[in-house]
């Protein structure tokens, strides 16, 4: 049976519909809640490592004493050829571990914005036409060496990449569901300036009604195909 281990950085950015996908597959579930000082797992204790988002940055090791240990955990997972998925901060941590630059983007990207396939790849080919993803980030990353870019948006050229078939990094939030979204809005309300690529709370909630139903079907296909691709 597949053993899935989540790393959750803050209470208000939980696994969302990724948990629904894991339960539907009847995989084993384990969680490291960093905010509770829980230990990071050894690579032999899981098959798939999923690293969630959070408001911190990848260079804040002095502020967040656990961050170096988490990077070591991710590095071990990649070295041991485990499946690895990173969402938002998780994607930035993966990029950092792979030696790519991670830095503040020229502007924040918050709300429902379209993403596009940037290459002909089994994962990017799953993207439906006119697909809007949920975004909440101020940092971005360079494409790591030997990684293949998968997605981009109008605001941010790096929305996702695949590395050696078994490491998937996504800047956007395909795991979004209503409760998770409302929690993120509550904790990040001060960032909703309604300028540039930052939408207002009202517009985000309004567009959620339109775009939320498309998220879980895409996530399921993406994860199923990712695990198949990694085995090939």
Image (tube, helix red, strand yellow):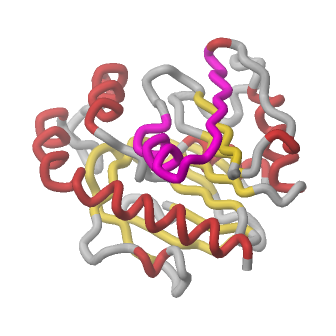
Question: Can you give x and y, in whole percent of width and height, for residue 179 in the image?
Answer: 29, 30
Question: Can you give x and y, in whole percent of width and height, for residue 189 in the image?
Answer: 28, 24
Viewer-closest of 16 and 66:
16
Viewer-closest of 220 and 108:
220
Residue that appears at 63% across and 47% down: 92
Viewer-closest of 41 and 186:
41
Residue that appears at 53% across and 53% down: 25
| Residue most extreme to the top | 36
Is-magenta flag for residue 212?
no
Is-magenta flag for residue 21?
yes
Residue that appears at 55% across and 71% down: 225
Q: Locate residue 38: give its quadrant.
A: top right
Question: Can you give x and y, in whole percent of width and height, for residue 113 in the image?
Answer: 28, 57
Q: Locate residue 89: give its quadrant.
A: top right
Instruction: Identify whether 108 is placed above or below 202.
Output: below
Question: Can you give x and y, in whole percent of width and height, for residue 164 in the image?
Answer: 76, 71
Residue that appears at 61% across and 54% down: 141
Q: Which residues are magenta?
A: 15-35
**In the picture, which quadrant includes the C terminus?**
bottom right
Instruction: Identify whether 61 is placed above or below 177.
Output: above
**Is residue 134 something one can see in this rendering?**
yes
**Is residue 108 something one can see in this rendering?**
no
Position of residue 154 in the picture relative to residue 223 (left or right): left
Position of residue 123 in the picture relative to residue 182 (left or right): right
Position of residue 73 in the picture relative to residue 219 (left or right): right
């Amino acid at each position: 049976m597949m053993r899935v281990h989540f790393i959750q950085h803050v209470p208000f950015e939980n696994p969302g519909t990724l948990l629904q996908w894991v339960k539907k597959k009847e995989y084993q579930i384990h969680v490291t809640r960093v905010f509770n000082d829980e230990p990071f797992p050894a690579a032999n204790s899981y098959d798939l490592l999923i690293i969630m988002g959070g408001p911190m940055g990848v260079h804040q090791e002095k502020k967040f004493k656990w961050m170096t240990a988490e990077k070591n955990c991710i590095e071990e997972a990649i070295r041991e050829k485990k499946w690895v998925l990173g969402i938002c901060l998780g994607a930035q941590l993966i990029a950092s571990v792979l030696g790519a630059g991670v830095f503040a983007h020229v502007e924040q990207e918050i709300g429902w914005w379209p993403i596009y396939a940037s290459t002909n790849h089994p994962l990017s080919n799953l993207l439906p036409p006119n697909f809007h993803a949920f975004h909440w980030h101020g940092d971005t990353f360079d494409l790591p060496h030997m990684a293949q870019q998968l997605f981009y948006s109008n605001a941010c050229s790096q929305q996702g990449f695949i590395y050696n078939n078994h490491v998937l990094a996504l800047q956007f939030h395909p795991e979004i569901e209503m409760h998770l979204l409302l929690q993120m809005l509550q904790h990040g309300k001060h960032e909703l300036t309604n300028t540039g690529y930052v939408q207002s709370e009202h517009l985000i909630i309004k567009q959620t009604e339109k775009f939320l139903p498309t998220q879980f079907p895409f996530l399921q296909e993406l994860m199923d195909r990712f695990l198949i691709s990694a085995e090939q």
